[in-house]
Image: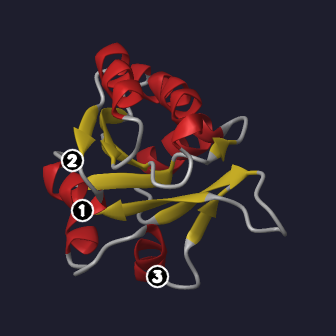
Amino acid sequence: MLSVIVETADAGDRLPALLAALTSAAVEGLVREVLIAGGEPPELLAVLREETGAELADDLASALRAARSDRLLVAPAKIRLKPGWLALLAKHLRGGGGDALLMGEGGFFGEKPYGVLIGRNAALALAHPDLKRLRGQLGRGAVRLA
């Protein structure tokens, strides 16, 4: 099972849609918990926490420390998950798949939003974690779940 950490710094307005999409992953037994890292406005986060059971963390580093699973999916709130993302993720995990990128839809100038599937210890090894540094931990040949 995964802990999902949603980084809200850049698109908190898309957070409700992402949390709704993650609900199906929880029902399938793939997601253990969801942590929301950072974000505004606090009133919206409080409502979302109440409705979804997601936990709040001040920032990504705090969320990484609070995560209870050994495998993490860290994604920006702006990601729009592609149709079939859940089946791809489930197949990857059940096949013993390791670190990977979960590619989203959209993005400007060909840059697509992505989530990083990574081990908790590797993520905690970063002094100042952010999504780009987590991506860097995977290397250029990272598996892409698209």
Nearer the N terminus, badge 1 or badge 3?
1
Between disc 2 and disc 3, the foreground one is 3
Q: Do the residues labelled 1 and 2 touch (CB within 8 Å)?
A: yes
Relative height, residue 21 to residue 98 (above, below): above
The image position of residue 50, as x and y in percent, is 29, 16
- What residue does disc 1 label? 120
SS of the residue at dot 3?
helix
- Check the image and name the residue furthest to the right: 109
Q: Name the residue nearer the viewer: 116 or 60.
A: 60
CA–CA distance between discs 1 and 2?
7 Å
| Label 2 – label 3 distance at C-alpha | 21 Å
The C terminus, quarter of image: bottom right
* Residue 122 percent coordinates (x, y): 26, 73
Q: Quadrant of residue 28?
A: top left
The amino acid marked with disc number 2 is: Ser
Relative side of 146 to 128, left or right? right
Q: Is residue 80 above or below residue 10?
A: above
Whether residue 124 is visible: yes
Tell me the quadrant of the picture where the N terminus can be found: top left
Element at label 1 = helix
- Residue 32 circle label: none
- Pointer 2 residue: 69
Give left or right: position of 130 versus 58.
Answer: right
Q: What is the distance, in whole Å, between disc 1 and disc 3 at their CAs?
A: 15 Å
Q: Taking 89 as reference, is 128 left or right?
A: left
Structural crowding at the residue carrying mark 3, measured as other residues with C-alpha within 10 Å and reported as few (<14), some (14–19) or many (≥20): few
Q: Which of 47 and 79 is in front in this view?
A: 47
